[in-house]
Image (tube, grey):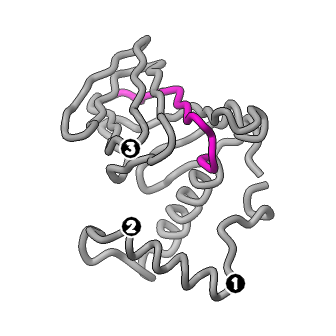
Amino acid sequence: MSKVGQVIHNPISGESFTFLKTAEETNGAYFQFEWRLKPDGLMPFAHVHPYQTETFEVLQGEMSVLINHAVQVIKAGETITVPAGAVHQPMNPKRQELVVRVTFRPALNADFALETICALAVMSDTYPDDDELAAPPIPAPNVLKFAAMLSHLASYRSYYPRYSE
């Protein structure tokens, strides 16, 4: 279960996340965390949140974010909200750490998803010789949906509370 003050890391991308407000604490209204990204770093992939807005408030540094094929630059003290359904990828083009307050509205399961993504990154970093992608996962959404279906049939769950505490 996500907790305020919890810090998780993605060793592959150099990101860290400090939970400020959890979905449970806000009764699902929003999920908020502080995101830190190393110099010249970027979120590993462009992505979309079909039912959530994502607001970035830059606290330190300068962030570039690709939103639907257009790059926008947000400096310290500025805020931008990515609308639900927009493809986006934030990055840190500067040579200093980027610190951003990020808010998802509504929260949905964003906190659990973030924990899972970082856990998978840690596993990948810990066992680098076990698996790797041969090419960019172009049909990833369909492959992931099929894998999810097979996982449910095999009795795997999407959330394991003992690993989030």
Number of residues whose C-alpha sits closer than 10 Å to that of mark 1, classed few (under 14), some (14–19) or many (20 or more): few
Residue type at numbered disc 3: Gly
The answer to whether 32 is drawn above or below residue 150 in the figure is: above
Number of residues whose C-alpha sits closer than 10 Å to that of mark 2, classed few (under 14), some (14–19) or many (20 or more): few
Residue type at numbered disc 2: Pro
- Between label 3 and label 1, give the one nearer the viewer: 3
Residue type at numbered disc 1: Ser
Number of residues whose C-alpha sits closer than 10 Å to that of mark 3, classed few (under 14), some (14–19) or many (20 or more): some
The answer to whether 89 is drawn above or below residue 145 in the figure is: above
Q: Earlier in the sequence, mark 2 or mark 3?
A: 3
Image quadrant occupied by the C terminus: bottom right
Q: Where residue 85 is drawn, which disc sits there?
A: 3
Choose top left, top right, bottom left or bottom right for residue 71.
top left
Tell me: 57 left or right of 33: left
Q: Earlier in the sequence, mark 3 or mark 1?
A: 3
Which type of secondary structure does the marked residue at label 2 adopt?
helix
Name the foreground residue: 8 vs 21: 21
Residue drawn where x is 55% and y is 85% of the image: 150
Q: Mark 2 near mark 1, Cβ–Cβ under 8 Å?
A: no
Q: Which residue is mark 2?
A: 141
- Between label 2 and label 3, give the one nearer the viewer: 3
Q: CA distance from mark 3 to mark 1?
A: 31 Å
Q: Position of residue 54 (x, y in %)?
A: 47, 34
Choose top left, top right, bottom left or bottom right for residue 69.
top left
Tell me where the magenta segment starts and ends, as one range.
Answer: 95-110
Which type of secondary structure does the marked residue at label 1 adopt?
loop
Q: CA distance from mark 2 to mark 3?
A: 14 Å
Q: Which residue is mark 1?
A: 155
